[in-house]
Amino acid sequence: MVEAEPGQTVVTTLFLPERAFQVWEDGWRTVEGGHLVEVGRSAADLRLSATVKI
């Protein structure tokens, strides 16, 4: 977990394993293309988003 005070900027790195971009189709297959990654306190409170390409 990364926390910041109001107005404070924090830089962090998020590592996602290849499995995060895979689906099961008679075996695990990596889905290529753009994937939206969203970050927040909960699914109802998303504050950042970015698209990553595989």
Image: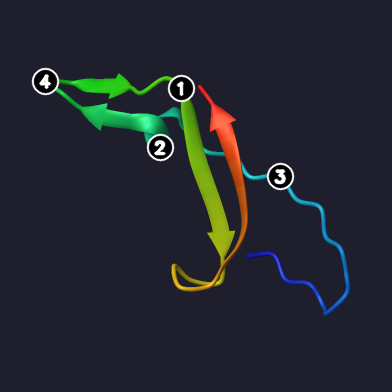
Question: Residue 12 at what x, y percent from top left?
Answer: 75, 51
- What residue is disc 1 on? 33
Name the kind of residue labelled 2 in the image.
Answer: Ala
Question: Residue 54 at what x, y percent from top left?
Answer: 50, 22
Within the image, what quadrant is residue 32 found in?
A: top left
Within the image, what quadrant is residue 20 found in?
A: top left
Q: Nearer the viewer, mark 1 or mark 3?
A: 1
Disc with the residue nearer the chain's start (1 vs 3): 3
Q: Nearer the viewer, residue 48 or 15?
A: 48
Q: Nearer the viewer, mark 1 or mark 2?
A: 1
Instruction: State the CA–CA distance, disc 1 to disc 3.
Output: 21 Å
Left or right of residue 30: residue 17: right
Identity of the residue drawn at 57% across and 37% down: 51
Check whether the beta carbons of the residues at disc 1 and disc 3 lie within 8 A of each other. no
Disc with the residue nearer the chain's start (4 vs 2): 2
Within the image, what quadrant is residue 43 found in?
A: bottom left
Name the kind of residue labelled 1 in the image.
Answer: Gly
Disc with the residue nearer the chain's start (1 vs 4): 4
Instruction: State the CA–CA distance, disc 4 to disc 2.
Output: 17 Å
- What residue is disc 3 on? 13
- What residue is disc 2 on? 20
Name the kind of residue labelled 4 in the image.
Answer: Asp
Q: Quadrant of the N terminus?
A: bottom right
Instruction: State the CA–CA distance, disc 2 to disc 3.
Output: 16 Å
Check whether the beta carbons of the residues at disc 1 and disc 2 lie within 8 A of each other. no
Q: Residues within 10 Å of mark 2 (few under 14, many from 20)?
A: few
